[in-house]
Image (cartoon, helix red, strand yellow):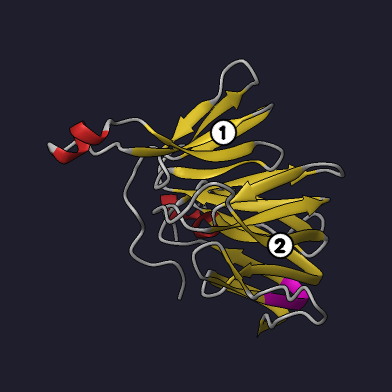
Amino acid sequence: MKSDLFSSESLAQPAAAPGMTLQNAKSVKYAVNGEMHARQGSMIAYRGNLQFERKGQGLGGMLKRAVTGEGLALMAVKGQGEAWFAHEAANCFIVDIEQGDALTVNGRNVLCFDATLSYEIKTVKGAGMTGGGLFNSVFSGYGKLAVMCEGVPIVIPVSHQQPVYVDTDAVVGWSASLQTSLHRSQSVGSMIRGGSGEAVQLKLEGEGFVIVRPSELVPQKTGS
């Protein structure tokens, strides 16, 4: 049988080494040799001997909840084999986190990650009751994290001399070392008269970067 469908760009090849790679712009391939973590419902195919388990809560005083960001449930994938992950044809990107790094990510943008990464749920300081979510996931340690985004994201440097203001519905993530607060860009009088639709943003200060997506639309589904 012949077709452009069987081109090298589409055909899945055996993994050369364990770990995460981009299958294409819309999906991530993970060669599992032990354990990894992923968004529940994001597995689109697998081969080999793999088990998929809902992640539960941790033990002790600091319970690690089995959700990230805006209610994203996670699963552990264990065994040996290959699995493919995607979500609503969003664009996928791999972030390589090294020791000393820390990245804050909105839960709606997390696809999958190495089990070697540490993550915890934290409130976004100064965010109040904003539409972007009260909680974000902070990833640290070492390993790879697959982030997804509607459209091609924009990475904006942040410096002490030049803070950045982002729409809470558009922000994907930012350097965890940045300080956050709410910024009101409209006067009360302007808001009473109808406003511009851009009343409040998340202000980011310090040294680092922020990732935003080219859309303010809130996804209808955060998991499955």
Q: Which of disc 1 and disc 2 is earlier in sequence?
A: 2
- Distance of label 2 from label 1 (alpha carbons): 20 Å
Q: In the image shown, does 73 or 88 lie closer to the viewer? A: 73
Residue mark closest to the camera, 2 vs 1:
1
Amino acid identity at mark 2: Glu
Q: Quadrant of residue 194?
A: top left
Q: In the image shown, does 120 or 78 lie closer to the viewer? A: 120
Residue at the spot 74% in from the left edge and 72% down from the top edge = 81
Residue 220 falls within the magenta-colored stretch: no
Q: Is residue 95 left or right of residue 40?
A: right
Disc 2 secondary structure class: strand
Q: Which residue is mark 2?
A: 120
Q: Which residue is mark 1?
A: 204
Amino acid identity at mark 1: Leu
Q: Is residue 86 left or right of residue 178?
A: left
Disc 1 secondary structure class: strand
Q: Quadrant of residue 13?
A: bottom right
Q: Is residue 11 visible?
A: no
Q: Magenta segment range?
A: 76-81
Report x, y in % for residue 19.
77, 58
Q: Is residue 58 visible?
A: yes
- Quadrant of the image containing the C terminus: bottom left
Q: Is residue 54 left or right of residue 219?
A: right
Q: Residue furthest top?
A: 161
Residue at the spot 41% in from the left edge and 38% down from the top edge = 201
Say few, some or many: other residues with alpha carbon within 10 Å of mark 2 (under 14 / 14 to 19 / 20 or more).
Answer: some
Say few, some or many: other residues with alpha carbon within 10 Å of mark 1 (under 14 / 14 to 19 / 20 or more).
Answer: many
